[in-house]
Amino acid sequence: MGRPFRLGDEDRPDYASALDEVIASPEIQRLLERSGVPGDRLRVRGLAAVAWVAHAADAEYRRYTALRRHTRGGSREAGASPLSGPGDQERPGAGVLAVLGVLTPVLAAVAAATFLVLGYGLRLAEALPALADTLVGVGWLSLGVAAATALVSVAALYRTAVKQAAADAAPAVPDASLSPALGRAREVWLGALRDRGIRPFLLQELAGTAAPAPDAGDGSRFSPPAFAGPGFSGPGFEGSARTAPRPPAPGRP
């Protein structure tokens, strides 16, 4: 079938659909009924041999993928870049800022509660008034920091959610199916794949799995013993070694 060929992961569903179409064709169905091979087994073999079968439409596939890369590249430069993907990954500090935005209000609120409890506890006990006033002041300051950072975090999350929703609602790059030239290139590739790759492979597989007709001259066939043979004397192992005595010749005693 040719040398192994690398088919892109995003094109493997198209290959599987083309394989199903060829298997469902009347020609392959008649051969399946004649050979007795299950269709599922034939499909598994076709999927396993994708590296060899897809090589038959190598030229059409390369033109299709080149046009697809050109279309996507030009549309990406004209529109906004996606949030993630090869070459457009998020900044390294984005994850750290998100974690700090969540942890800072929580830590500040815990610190504020601790300082306020200690400060007001010392005031109630009328012990160390200077320390109690300091703890109360730090507690209220921590509570203010917690409230401010919580508001900032909520605003940042809302802004990120709005940007993500806008990116999902209005994609910057057109879909491959919206490009007529790209759609035609895809159909040409699939047609060549079905005619020159999948169909010959399935015919070869069905021809190889057909049961050979019994041959009368095959030496491997079992030939029953000649029960009427002259040397057969019984079912014992020594039957063929014993021979009946020859009758005397006429005129001799």
Image (cartoon, rainbow, N blue to C red):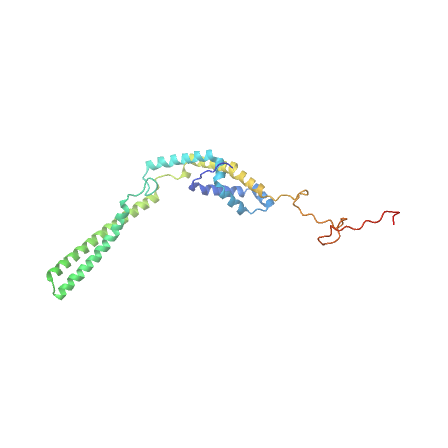
Q: For this rendering, which residue is in front, 38 or 252?
A: 252
Place of residue 81 in the rendered image (x, y in percent of width and height, measured from the top left): 32, 40
Residue 181 screen position, x and y as percent: 43, 34
Q: Kindly tell me whether residue 125 is visible in this rendering.
A: yes
Specify whether 15 is left or right of 120.
right
Q: Which residue lies furthest to the front in this view?
A: 253
Q: In which quarter of the image is residue 67?
A: top left
Report the front residue among 145 and 154: 145
* Residue 26 visible in the displayed image: no
Left or right: residue 214 versus residue 52 is: right
Q: Residue at x 47, y 35 (%)?
A: 58
Which residue is located at x 23 percent, y 50 percent? 152
Q: Above or below — where is 252 with respect to 187?
A: below
In the rendered image, residue 182, in percent from the top left (x then y), is placed at 42, 35
Instruction: Say how many tags the image has.
Output: 0
Residue lying at the far right in this picture: please name it.
Answer: 251
Instruction: Determine whether, in the image, residue 175 is placed left or right of residue 212.
Output: left
Residue 130, compared with residue 173, is above or below; it is below
159 relative position to 3: left or right: left
The picture places residue 40, in percent across and down from the top left corner, at 53, 47
Q: Nearer the viewer, residue 82 or 179?
A: 82
- The answer to which image quadrant residue 163 occupies is top left
